[in-house]
Amino acid sequence: MTTKPLQKERENRSAEKKDLTFHPYTISPESAHTSIVLLESTEPEILCQTLRAITKFSAQDMQNRVVLFDLDAIKYILAHVEHPDINIRRFSLKALAQLCQLPRGPEQVLRDPQNLRRIALMLVKIEDVFVLEFASLVLSELTREPLGCEQLVSANILSSLFSRMKNSLDPDVQKNCLQTLSNLLEDPICAAEVTKNNQFSWPSLLALMQSQYLAIQHAALRTVDQLICRYQDMVVQKTFRASTGVLDLCDILESYEFRDVHTQVLGVLRNYVETEENARHLYQSGCILRLIAYLEMALPAMKPFCLAVLTKMSFTANGREALFATDTDLVFCHQLLSSNVELLADAAMGVANMTKLLPSAVRMSDTNIIEALCAILGDDAAVWFYIRINALRALAELCHIIPKAAFSLVETKTFSALRAINKKYKDTPIEAQRLAVQCYINLENYHVSKKAMLNGEFMSELLSIMQRIDINLKIMTCTVLTGLMTEETGRDLFTIKKGEEIVASNLSIEHVGLRTALCTLIAASVSNEGADVYLDLGVIHYMVGNRQARYVVGAWEPALEAIFRHHPAAKLAYTGRLEINDFTKEGFYCQKRLGQRFPSMQTLMTNTGRPYSPVFICLFQQPPADLGSGSTLPKSDSKPPSDVTITASLSGRLRFPPVPDDHDLRDYLLKMKLWFGDPSKSLHYFEIEDAHYEVRYRDKCEEVTSSLKERAKLLAEFVAEQMSGLSQENDCSLPSVDLYLADLMTELASPILGLGFVKAGGALERALLFKVLADRLGLPCALFRTSSSYAWCEVAVPELDAEDEVDREKPHVFPAGLLRTNYVVDLIVKPGRLLPRGGREARHYCGPVCAPPYTARELPEVCRCERRA
């Protein structure tokens, strides 16, 4: 009977104890320092075994190399690289190469230039295969640093490096030498030394591209790529073109055996065709047709790389001609229909570049290229970069020079795909938005496509783009809008969609380019109604007062002049003058007393406060019956209806205030025309339509005659007579005129007074009446204002020289373009006198030279008179 054990049988753990015996040639992280100590031994056997153990330890893990590096192993290993024992030399070079693969390894070796020199000389003197392998490996690691490249070039062993690369039977030596050369080519200074070396030749390097070893192939292709990318080195480029390089590369592509390096070969070719000469050489060598054939037969993964080579050629003029000669442009068009999405980006880019060659653009436009590109553009599954972006580039280029492409793009389906980019701007990159706007710019080159964009919806879309934050996008959109403003429909749509408000909001952005584009748009788009809007929005006040912008932005002044041309009342208010080419239009008005800002007529009409200053307005046309019936002033005699057609458009009489019909002003003009007769006797004009009250003669004037002087006198006398007051005293002093105007405003129940209603006027009122009549009688007249109640007119009338012996009774013809104001018209003291400009009497009449113009701005506090000699 077996008895139970008294206790559980336990395992004897002491039977297997740790081996604490010291093994000097088996290294662990804990005992690595011991191995470093052994490197100081003088026994060859110990050194050999220790170095051998170090190489094994380093090969196990990269962290082991860090342990050795921290123990300063490189210093001890360097002491044995030239040891007489060949094995010690081999293992020391191998261990050194392993440690140099650490980031800080080369730095410690390169502290002493002699270290690299000693290793480099081994390539020259020693034939041992293992020594050559590890010495070349050390050099390939050291030359990763610029200092290593410099020291290697100084060692003057480049010839030996080339020789080992060509003739060594060991593939590792060849690979390491190739890597070293590649590192040298990365350094701009050392690269020149490589290419200048006598041992450098293309055949030996090209032969290595077809090596049976993949690593050598990769190294050789990388070196060739670095060399051909030295585009400024004419010797390298010329010698490569003279070699069989591109043919060898194409041979590799056509070999299934070398399929593993096809991607790298295509990358080399892609970089090679960067220049014009290289692109021509590739065509002349027949490689383009071979690439097209490879594109057809290659695996799907290789096709994008092959197409990238052809696309890169399209960036150069010679490349485009070569591609056109080989029908590659049609290959690009065909690839746009491919199911391989990786081909779409390069195909679209190729189409965009080939469009720069007109024959190719015409040939591509005969296909369904526009529909294909718009289909890519409308595919939300396609990525923007760079498939849809390149499709946009292609559309922009095609529409720029090919009318047929532009007409196809503005069709409903295709144009909607283009417009959707900016409609869905939150989901599209800013580059796509800019390219879409560039397409709009290019479409404006043709009347048909521009007409398709002239609609309210598209105008609203453009104005919404103007409200985004991107400055370049705003500038480009301004260019589109400026192009549309050449059509009257475009200008009307711009005002209807409140484009002036968008311009006003952007004008405050301090960007020279944007302000230039906005000012160009203002000059192109401004109309009579637009000028009123700009006045209401304060744009005119802002532009006049911003002196810095007027100096920096070249288009600022032309834009301001364009607004003033459509709103002469604002020009008079902000500059205090109207030149002889500034014509008072229907509805011209003038405030007697100006404030800080000049108001629009709509603002004056809606002002509910008590009027304290009259506003003079020029209205020749008869108002419509429904407006004229509201007059409270009885007419002296009823006039028959005029033959003039009253237009009810935006620019017609309806946009003016409902004031009583100013028939007296109309009578003034008709009476003066009866006195002066046919204006053609004093003006030679062309294409003048019959319009009684519009300023047409001075616009069309080419020549003037000397009879204008007498007419200026007669008109001055007539104006003074009409504004000499209602009493026999002819009291037209300033207080009397002010009282009269106050009574007239009360009688008409409005501060807005027609000039014909004013029968007692001072200098301002008479100058205004003279100016508006002179503009319609073909008399060149300028108006100047220096105070709330004082203004004068100057006329430009030709006169004969006193020394000329000519018939003074007969009118003489003078070029109208040479007219300058030469007389000041006396409307107050002795009405009808013409005072020579600059004379004593004229200076007395006009006031001091230092008197600033009366404008709707802050006046200077100090009067700076001009000192006369």
Image (cartoon, grey):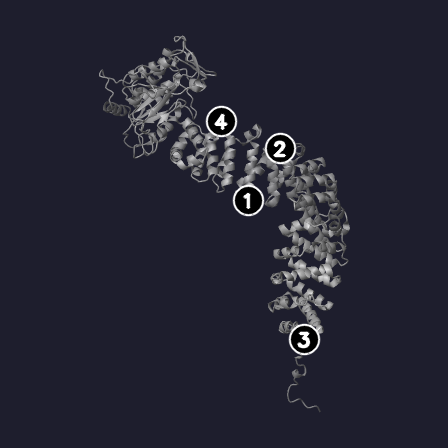
Q: Nearer the viewer, residue 670 or 478?
A: 478
Q: Which residue is mark 2?
A: 405
Q: Amino acid at mark 2?
A: Ala
Name the element at disc 3: loop
Q: Which residue is mark 4?
A: 488
Q: Which residue is mark 3?
A: 24
Q: Specify whether residue 665 is in view.
A: yes
Name the element at disc 1: loop
- Would residue 64 appear left or right of 620 to someone viewing this image? right
Q: Nearer the viewer, residue 763 or 847?
A: 847
Please count the marks in the image: 4
Q: Residue furthest bottom?
A: 1
Q: Amino acid at mark 3?
A: Pro
In the rendered structure, are the residues bearing label 2 and label 1 in contact, judged by CB atoms less than 8 Å apart? no
* Badge nearest the viewer, 3 or 4: 3
User: In this picture, is 632 found above or below 18?
Assistant: above
Residue 232: % across, % down: 64, 44
